[in-house]
C-alpha cells in the first residue's frame, strides 16, 4: 500500500520524525538504480552548473504531494505474478497524460537528443505536482476541465512572488500561483511555455503543452538526464527541496519498473491540498476565511460513581463553504456581433472582434479575463505587432480585441477567444486576407518597342497600376507573350524573357508593383522570326494592358 505522509508539506515545515520515516520508506521502495547524486551515490558525476536558486524554481517552490509509491513492483499487463491491486492502480497513468509525456520525449529527442529525457521523469514530476492532472481529468485536447492552481504565493507559509501575469493564467492579479498539471508559475511559463498539441496556443492547463515545457526546462543548461548528477540538478531546479528530489526519484524509479495506460479520469486522484478541497473552477481572488464555530463548553463531570469524569474534547465545526452565485459563475462565451473579417494584404481589418462572457443565468459577466490568439499560417497581427492579447470584459460582459492588421500572406486564418485559464470552449473567428488589387494598368511611356532578329529590345517596359485612381503598391502582375486571336495563348515563338539560368521563358509570374505602383519588366529578347507580337500584363483584380513588340531587320 502506498506510503502516506499527509497531503502537501510546506518547505521547512516537515518534522524530523516525518522526514526520518520518509527517508526510510524511500530507501525501501527505490530500486538499485535509484541512487541520488547528492547523497554521494554512484553514477557519472558530470560537472554542471550550480543548483538554481529558490527564485528560479519552475514551480516557485510551491508545496507538492508527498505520497510515495507502493513498495512493490508495478503489476505490468500480462505479468504472471498476481500483485496487489494498489500496485496496479498506482502504476496506471491516464491515457492522454501518458500520451503527452511520451510525445514530449519524442519531440525533445529530435530537437535535443543529447538531453536523453525519459518520459518516466515527466510522469514522476506530474504525479508529485498534480497527481497526473487529478487522475486524468482532461478533455479530448488534453486541457484540464478546471484549472489546477497552487496556493497563493503571498509569503504566508509559502514563497512571496508578486503577480507577473496580471492574473492571466492564475486569476490572481496580486500574487502568483503555480498553474496546471506541471505547476508552472506564470513568470516561468512566459519563458518556457510550449505548444505541445499544435493548436496554436501555449496553455499551462494543457497536459501536452505543460509536459513539453517541463521537458525543455529540465534539459536546460546542456544537461544529460541519463547522468545521475544532471538528473538531480534538473529536478532540484524544478523545486529546490531535497525532500522533493527524493519523492520524484522514488516515483521515477517506480514508473521505470513498469506502468500501464488507464482511461482518462480514472487515475488515482490525490488527496485534497492541506486538508482542503480542489481549487475552484473559478479562480480569482483568495477566498475569504470563514470564522470557525465557537466550541461548546466542556460537559460537567459526572457525580462520583456516575461514570468517567474526563470531559470529551469538543468537535470542531468545519468552516462552511458558500457555492458561487449563478450570477457570478462564468458559463461560457459567445460572439458579440462580430461581422465578416476581410482585409486586403497590408491593410487593417475594418471589423473588430468582440466577445461576450455569460454567467450561469445567461446574463453578462464582468471582469472576465479573455485571451485573443491569432492562429494559422499568417503574418497578420494585432495592433502593436502582437499575436496574442489578454483583456478584461466590461460591465456589459463584452470585450473588443485591438485592431487586426493584415500582413502580406493571403488566405484564411483564425482568431480564438478563450476565457484565460478556464477549460471552456473557445469562440473561433475566421479571417481572410485577400491579395492587393488594381483596376487599371498602363505603360508609363509610349515609345515604340522594336528589336532586330536575335537581338534584345533596347527600351525597357515599365507599367503603373492604380486602384480607384490611387497608387496600387504590392500588386501581383503576370506578364505573358501571347498569340493573336479571340482566345490568346502563350506564344511559342517571337520575343521572350530569360530565367535565372538563362533559359527562354515567355510567361513571368510573381511580379509585383513597387511602393509607387510601378513595375519595370526584365529585359526582353527577340528570336530570329520577324513580325509583330503581343505582350499581355494582367494584375490581381483583373486589370490588363496589351503591348506591341516588333521584330524587324534594320533598314539598309
Image (spheres, helix red, strand yellow):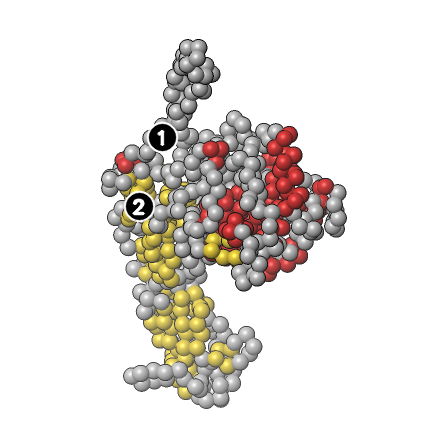
Tell me the mark number nearer the camera, choosing from 2 and 1: 1
Q: Which residue is mark 1?
A: 321
Q: Nearer the viewer, residue 467 or 291?
A: 291
Q: Position of residue 131 (x, y in %)?
A: 50, 45
Residue at figure coordinates x 43%, y 53% from the top left? 264
Q: Which quadrant would the N terminus be assigned to in this image?
A: top right
Q: Is residue 405 above or below residue 281?
A: below
Q: Element under label 2? A: strand
Q: Nearer the viewer, residue 223 or 437?
A: 223
Residue at figure coordinates x 36%, y 71% from the top left? 538
Q: Is residue 480 visible?
A: yes
Q: Is residue 109 above or below residue 25?
A: below
Give the left or right position of residue 47, taking residue 340 as reference.
Answer: right
Q: Position of residue 175 (x, y in %)?
A: 48, 31
Q: Position of residue 512 (x, y in %)?
A: 43, 65
Q: Characterize the local packing of mark 2: few (<14), some (14-19) or many (20 or more) Cα atoms within 10 angstroms.
A: many
Q: Are marks 2 and 1 in contact (CB under 8 Å)?
A: no
Give the left or right position of residue 319, taking residue 66 as reference.
Answer: left
Q: Quadrant of residue 421?
A: top left
- Residue 197's mark? none
Give the left or right position of residue 541, taking residue 508 as reference.
Answer: left
Q: CA separation, marks 2 and 1? A: 27 Å
Residue at figure coordinates x 45%, y 16% from the top left? 308
Q: Characterize the local packing of mark 1: few (<14), some (14-19) or many (20 or more) Cα atoms within 10 angstroms.
A: few
- Residue 333's mark? 2
Q: Position of residue 310 (x, y in %)?
A: 47, 16
Q: Quadrant of residue 74?
A: bottom right
Q: Nearer the viewer, residue 26 or 403?
A: 26
Q: Element under label 1? A: loop
Query: Which comes sooner in the sequence, label 2 or label 1?
Result: 1
Q: Residue furthest front?
A: 305
Q: Nearer the viewer, residue 479 or 366?
A: 366
Amino acid at each position: 500500500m502506498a506510503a502516506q505522509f499527509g497531503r502537501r508539506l510546506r518547505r521547512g515545515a516537515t518534522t524530523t520524525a516525518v522526514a526520518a520515516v520518509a527517508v526510510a520508506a524511500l530507501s525501501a521502495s527505490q530500486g538499485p538504480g535509484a541512487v541520488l547524486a547528492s547523497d554521494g551515490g554512484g553514477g557519472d558525476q558530470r560537472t554542471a552548473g550550480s543548483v538554481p536558486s529558490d527564485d528560479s524554481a519552475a514551480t516557485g517552490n510551491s508545496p507538492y504531494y508527498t505520497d510515495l509509491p507502493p513498495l512493490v513492483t508495478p503489476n505490468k499487463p500480462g505479468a504472471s505474478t498476481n500483485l496487489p491491486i494498489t500496485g496496479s492502480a498506482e502504476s496506471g497513468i491516464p491515457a492522454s497524460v501518458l500520451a503527452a509525456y511520451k510525445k514530449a520525449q519524442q519531440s525533445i529527442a529530435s530537437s535535443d537528443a543529447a538531453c536523453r529525457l525519459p518520459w518516466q521523469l515527466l510522469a514522476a514530476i506530474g504525479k508529485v505536482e498534480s497527481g497526473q492532472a487529478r487522475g486524468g481529468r482532461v478533455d479530448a485536447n488534453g486541457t484540464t476541465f478546471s484549472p489546477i492552481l497552487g496556493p497563493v504565493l503571498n509569503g504566508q507559509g509559502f514563497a512571496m512572488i508578486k503577480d507577473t501575469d496580471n492574473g492571466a493564467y492564475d486569476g490572481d492579479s496580486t500574487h502568483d500561483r503555480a498553474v496546471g498539471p506541471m505547476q508552472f508559475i506564470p513568470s516561468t511559463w512566459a519563458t518556457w511555455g510550449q505548444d505541445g498539441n499544435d493548436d496554436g496556443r501555449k496553455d499551462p492547463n494543457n497536459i501536452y503543452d505543460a509536459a513539453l515545457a517541463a521537458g525543455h526546462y529540465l534539459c536546460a543548461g546542456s544537461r544529460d538526464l541519463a547522468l545521475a548528477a544532471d538528473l538531480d540538478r534538473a529536478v532540484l531546479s524544478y523545486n529546490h527541496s531535497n525532500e522533493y528530489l527524493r519523492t520524484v526519484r522514488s516515483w521515477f524509479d517506480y514508473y521505470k519498473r513498469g506502468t500501464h495506460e488507464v482511461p482518462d479520469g480514472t487515475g488515482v486522484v490525490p488527496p485534497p491540498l492541506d486538508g482542503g478541497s480542489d481549487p475552484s473552477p473559478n479562480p480569482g481572488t483568495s477566498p475569504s476565511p470563514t470564522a470557525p464555530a465557537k466550541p461548546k463548553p466542556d460537559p460537567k463531570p459526572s457525580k462520583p460513581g456516575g461514570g468517567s469524569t474526563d470531559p470529551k474534547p469538543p468537535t470542531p465545526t468545519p468552516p462552511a463553504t458558500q457555492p458561487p452565485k449563478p450570477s457570478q459563475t462564468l458559463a461560457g462565451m459567445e460572439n458579440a456581433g462580430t461581422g465578416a473579417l476581410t482585409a486586403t494584404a497590408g491593410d487593417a481589418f475594418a471589423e473588430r472582434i468582440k466577445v461576450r462572457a455569460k454567467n450561469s443565468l445567461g446574463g453578462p459577466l464582468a471582469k472576465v479575463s479573455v485571451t485573443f490568439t491569432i492562429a494559422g499560417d499568417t503574418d497578420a497581427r494585432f495592433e502593436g505587432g502582437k499575436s496574442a492579447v489578454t483583456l478584461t470584459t466590461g460591465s456589459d460582459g463584452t470585450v473588443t480585441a485591438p485592431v487586426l492588421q493584415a500582413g502580406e500572406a493571403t488566405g484564411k486564418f483564425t482568431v480564438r477567444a478563450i476565457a484565460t485559464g478556464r477549460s471552456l470552449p473557445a469562440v473561433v473567428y475566421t479571417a481572410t486576407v485577400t491579395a492587393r488589387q488594381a483596376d487599371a494598368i498602363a505603360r508609363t511611356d509610349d515609345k515604340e518597342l522594336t528589336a532586330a532578329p536575335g537581338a534584345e529590345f533596347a527600351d525597357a517596359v515599365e507599367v503603373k497600376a492604380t486602384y480607384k485612381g490611387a497608387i496600387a503598391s504590392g500588386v501581383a502582375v503576370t506578364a505573358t507573350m501571347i498569340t493573336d486571336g479571340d482566345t490568346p495563348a502563350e506564344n511559342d515563338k517571337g520575343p521572350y524573357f530569360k530565367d535565372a539560368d538563362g533559359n527562354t521563358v515567355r510567361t513571368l509570374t510573381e511580379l509585383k508593383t513597387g511602393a509607387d505602383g510601378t513595375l519595370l519588366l526584365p529585359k526582353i529578347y527577340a528570336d530570329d522570326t520577324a513580325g509583330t507580337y503581343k505582350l499581355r500584363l494582367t494584375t490581381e483584380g483583373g486589370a490588363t494592358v496589351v503591348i506591341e513588340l516588333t521584330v524587324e531587320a534594320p533598314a539598309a
